[in-house]
Amino acid sequence: MAERRGSGCTSLLSLLVVVALVLSGTVWLSPILDLDDVRRTVLTHDGLDGVAGSGGEGYTFMATTDRGAPVTWGCGADIELVVNPEGAPQGYEELVAGALGTVNAASSFTFLVVGESEDRNFFDRQRGPVLLGWADEDEVPQLAGPTAGLGGCVIPHRSGRLGPGGGRHRRPGHRPAARRLVRARIDEEVVLVHELLHVLGLGHTDDASQLMAAEHVGQSGLGEGDLEGIRAWSGPPATDLRSVPMTLVEVHPSAPEWNARIATTVRPNMFQTAEMGRAKARTGWRPRFFEVYDVPVTVHEKRAPGLGLVWYVPKGPVVADVDELAGLLPQLAAEARRAGAFLLKVEPELPESPGTLAALADLGLRHAGRIQNNVSTVLLDISGTAEELLARLPSRTRNTIRKGAKEGVEIEAAPADEASYARMWDLWEQVVADQGVFTRSRDYHVALWRDFCEAGSGQLFFARHEGRDIAGAFVVVVGTVANYREGASVRGRPVRGSAQLLQYEAMRWAQERGATTYDLCGTPHSSRVDDPEDPLHGVGEFKRGFSKEVTDWVGAFDLPLRPVRYALWERIGHRVAARLTSRDATAATFF
């Protein structure tokens, strides 16, 4: 690591250039930890007890300048870190990401995982990135006895160098078992946070309630003294969030209560509902619910290993125009950064135009393409009666609907049961096999259908002919908007008009539930509707049979909250995160 010089932090800071951090693999390798043992675990650090009289109530500094100022990295530094995965436990990426996220969120510094290393030289280090690895006492004698963590630094100054210190953490014996207790994982992350704070320059404190106490007696997070110490040498976060007047409140409603709030927005959609949050939780996301200026906003939160949190607002925030978004965005960005996010991704349903795109760019937003499949779509007016709806459709489509009925096609609104979900999956599998489309697992789809159907907002429809299913559709109504989420049919569509009749009956069902708009969800961009090479050309032709008008939304946009980490995410981070976090999908995807 190149030398970092103080640049205006609360206390002027000296240089800290070389660090070694070692965690004993013996904690991880014990499949079950006795919780009493964990709570009695002792950490005693040789040489890391802090300078006597330095710091304040609940904290000390590992080193100070001749004038008594604390020594740490330059203000706001990006601190590169490499990981040697030899001997690392399964899932260590999540452990490291959690600890780094905690430290990064609490300070103005940013630990950045820049790659892996084969380096095992934990002590006699020259300038370079922080090295993190796993070892045992045979390789690192300082890990003998109760030691679990070692963290330290080399600080050049006139009186010499402060060498790496050693930490001792009582380890339980090896006991074979089939599972690992959750508490054990939490304690290991706490140990890593403790050592990282030594890396930054905090010493031990006599206050046993603080995470930086010499003895670990069950502390589960940063104490007020720890935070005061961090603030003393790191200064405020890169963005002074206290300057943002907060009109944002996190809420914890029931699913019906939240869906009722979403239904009142100017352009309600299923992606902001509690049920969609529950579905995404099965792929590693955490749904969170906020009221911002009295606008309900669903945020999906997920950790990108080594970088921090991503906040994604699917098909939202639900706003009328860019001006309204401009009012909400600072509040969301401030809260996201408080939570440790490096990226806020929004996806408002605003009609695309040069003026709108320019206004979004003026807000600091970067265009990020498509995530949901209805960036371009066909919207149908389904207000009025069933007869008025039919009359508004093109004559050719009306004739096709009538032909399907004449040929004996019957439309079934299926019951919300496992047999119906199995029927829909059988049809869906044929689409996946024929077209090679991206899809998630059967369990994911069935759970999503079940959640919406049991909530009363979703419905599965089947077109049947001569006793068999030939097409299926899944439709969700939220407020005044119905979304045609998924559809499938057997090869060759043996009866002409079956798919059109299926859609017409789904629209009638949506009408009866108060919907006035029917979103057919997914076509090529309006500039490419006639391009046979577009992957959505075929489905676009079918959907444009109901209306030739295609609505183009602006799509997804990124608001970088920590520019260095965002740049790394753009280069390689999102691909790595996709491989590490993809669950139940036919291809790697983070979202």
Image (spheres, rainbow, N blue to C red):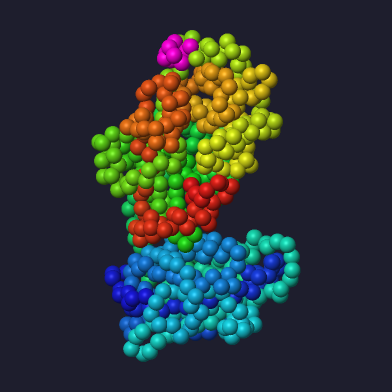
Residue 201 among magenta residues: no
- Quadrant containing the N terminus in the rendered view: bottom left
- Residue in the foreground of this view, choosing between 493 and 300: 493
Residue 559 on image: x %, y %: 36, 49
Which secondary structure is most common in the magenta stretch?
helix
Q: Name the image quarter holding residue 168.
A: bottom right
Give me the residue at 45% from left, 30% from top: 538
In depth, the one of 9 and 574 nearer the eye is: 574
| Frontmost residue, 442 versus 301 | 442
Q: Which residues are magenta?
A: 391-399
Up/down of 145 relative to 90, above or below: below
Q: What percent of the width, then of the height, locates residue 33?
A: 69, 68
Q: Residue at x 55, y 15 (%)?
A: 404
View extreme (bottom): residue: 159
Q: Quadrant of residue 421?
A: top right
User: Percent x, y for residue 558?
Assistant: 37, 48
